[in-house]
């Protein structure tokens, strides 16, 4: 059984590497990459396409479905490696692994949106040309976040755009810190469970 779990963990790690390479190569959309890239796409695209079905992982120009797919594979690899290491897998350890995997997706998204909001803040303060393609992409990502957060705090009242950016970045930062502390606390509790 240990051999099978080790093999599954290693295969999950190898597949994660293939997906990472595939994602990196997709950034060179116009380049002709030849037969190896086609084979790589045939191996990884069915899995990635399964994750792309969920609209929660896609917003505007951003597709976070590879992050979700990689997290799921990382979860499989961690479960296999933990079971081999401890010789068993308790419910507490499994809950901790799942909680930390879910938190890794959430914390990645929070960090990403904080960076986007900080970019938008810098552009606003320095009067950058906000009509370029780059800033349109940044706006398509930041506007839904700004809108939702400012509506929670100010309902229908209009607020200054700068205040909205600062408030949104601050709220996301507090959520990130609070979430990290909560996940750390819950992980300790789960690992201490007797079953």
Image (cartoon, rainbow, N blue to C red):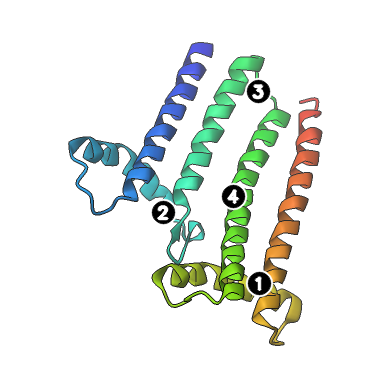
Q: Residues within 10 Å of mark 2 (few under 14, many from 20)?
A: some
Residue at the spot of label 3: 89
Separation of disc 2 and disc 4 at Cα?
17 Å
Q: Which mark is residue 108?
A: 4
Residue at the spot of label 1: 165
- The answer to whether mark 2 and mark 1 are in CB contact below 8 A is no
Residue 1 visible in the snapshot: no
Q: Earlier in the sequence, mark 3 or mark 4?
A: 3
Q: What residue do we see at 49% from left, 71% from top? A: 140
Q: Residues within 10 Å of mark 4 (few under 14, many from 20)?
A: some
Q: Is residue 89 above or below residue 162?
A: above
- The answer to whether mark 4 and mark 1 are in CB contact below 8 A is no
Q: What residue do we see at 73% from left, 30% from top? A: 92
Q: Earlier in the sequence, mark 2 or mark 4?
A: 2
Q: Nearer the viewer, mark 3 or mark 2?
A: 2
| SS assignment at label 1 | helix
Query: Considering depth in this image, is 150 or 138 the residue closer to the camera?
Result: 138
Q: Residue furthest front?
A: 126
Separation of disc 3 and disc 2 at Cα?
31 Å
Q: What residue do we see at 67% from left, 41% from top? A: 99
Q: Is residue 127 above or below residue 172?
A: below
Residue at the spot of label 2: 52
Separation of disc 3 and disc 1 at Cα?
44 Å
| SS assignment at label 4 | helix
Q: Residues within 10 Å of mark 1 (few under 14, many from 20)?
A: many
Separation of disc 4 and disc 1 at Cα?
19 Å
- The answer to whether mark 3 and mark 4 are in CB contact below 8 A is no
């Amino acid at each position: 059984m240990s051999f099978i779990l080790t093999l599954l963990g290693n295969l999950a790690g190898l597949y994660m590497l293939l997906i990472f390479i595939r994602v990196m190569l997709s950034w060179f959309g116009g380049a002709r990459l030849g037969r190896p890239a086609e084979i790589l796409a045939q191996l990884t695209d069915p899995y990635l396409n399964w994750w792309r079905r969920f609209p929660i992982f896609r917003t505007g120009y951003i597709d976070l479905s590879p992050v979700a797919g990689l997290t799921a594979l990382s979860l499989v690899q961690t479960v296999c490696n933990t079971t081999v290491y401890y010789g068993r897998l308790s419910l507490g350890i499994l809950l901790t692994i799942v909680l930390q995997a879910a938190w890794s997706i959430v914390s990645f998204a929070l960090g990403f949106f904080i960076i986007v909001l900080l970019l938008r803040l810098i552009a606003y303060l320095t009067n950058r040309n906000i009509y370029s393609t780059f800033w349109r992409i940044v706006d398509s990502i930041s506007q839904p976040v700004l809108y939702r957060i400012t509506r929670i705090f100010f309902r229908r009242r209009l607020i200054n755009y700068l205040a909205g950016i600062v408030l949104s970045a601050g709220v996301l930062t507090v959520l990130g810190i609070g979430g990290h502390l909560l996940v750390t606390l819950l992980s300790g509790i789960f690992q201490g469970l007797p079953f």
